[in-house]
Image (spheres, rainbow, N blue to C red):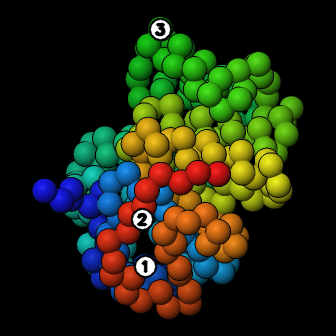
Amino acid sequence: MTEAPIIRFEGVSFGSPDGRRVIAGLSLTVAPGSFLFLTGPTRAGKSVLLDLISLAAVPSRGRIDVLGQDTDDLDRDERATLRRRIGVMHQDLRLLNDYSAFDNVALPARVSRRTTPDYREQVTEVLTWVGLGGRMDAFPSQLSPADRRRLAIAQAVINGPDILLADEPTDQLEGAARFAILRLLADLNRAGVTVLIATRDTALAEGSGAPVIRLGADPGQVGATLESEPVEF
C-alpha cells in the first residue's frame, strides 16, 4: 500500500503585499521520509513555500495538506499542534543572543510546556549530536557561523519533528563546514525525518543526487510525487 504524501499542494498561489505573484498555481506532493532541495533565484518564493508548509503563511488560492491534514480546516489549537510536528531552521537563524546555547535549544521545549527533567537530558543529547556538547553555556555571539547553524538545527529538532524545513542552512559557509551541516540534515533524514532544504546554491543541490524542486518567476505546475533515498555527504 502506497503511503499518503506528507506534503501536498494543489493549485497553490500566494501573492506578496505589493501585488506580485510569488507562487502561482503550484502543485506538488512530497513522500514521507524524503530528502529534497528547493532552488531558485532570490525572490522566487523559496522561503514563502517553506512558510506555507509550516503554516506561517496562508495561500491566497489552492489547498495544502500537511501530515495528512487540510491546513485550511484547522482551528487555532489544531494548527498549534500541527506546527509542533514541523521543525524550522530560518535563514536568519533567530537565535536569542542573551540566551546560552542550552537555553536557546530548551526554549521550544519550554514553550510546549514540557517539564525541566523531561527536556534537560534531551537538550544535552541534541547539542552533543550537533557537535556543541562542550559549548552549551556559550552565547550565539561566541560561536562561529557554522556553530550557530548547528545550534539552529538543534533548536529546530528538539521537539522531535516529522518534517524539518531548512532555509539556506549553508549560507556563508564553505568547504567542510558546508558539508558538515548537510551531514547533520542527512542523519535526521535517515532517522525518518522528511527534510526540505531551500538554497540558492544550485550546484550543491544538483550535485547531491537528491530530487530538486526548482522555482522561478512563475513556478507553475511541478506535479510529481517527490521522494528520495537517504543521501550521503
Q: CA distance from mark 1 to mark 2?
A: 9 Å
Q: Nearer the viewer, residue 223 or 100?
A: 223
Q: Earlier in the sequence, mark 1 or mark 3?
A: 1
Kindly indicate the quadrant of the structure image that contains residue 77. Answer: top left
Image mark for residue 69: none
**Where residue 44 sits: x, y (%)?**
58, 81
Image mark for residue 117: 3
* Residue 161 to residue 50: above or below: above
Q: Amino acid at mark 2?
A: Leu
Image mark for residue 52: 2
**Where residue 203 sits: x, y (%)?**
70, 73
The residue carrying mark 1 is 14
Circle 1 Cα neighbour tier, 10 Å, few/some/many (<14 / 14–19 / ≥20): many
Q: Nearer the viewer, residue 215 or 74?
A: 215
Q: Is residue 106 left or right of residue 31?
A: right
Q: Amino acid at mark 3?
A: Pro
Q: Is residue 231 left or right of residue 228?
A: right
Q: Is residue 20 left or right of residue 33?
A: right
Residue 181, visible in the rendered structure: yes
Mark 1 vs 3: CB contact within 8 A: no
Q: CA distance from mark 3 to mark 2?
A: 34 Å
Circle 3 Cα neighbour tier, 10 Å, few/some/many (<14 / 14–19 / ≥20): few
Q: CA distance from mark 1 to mark 3?
A: 42 Å
* Residue 79 to residue 29: above or below: above
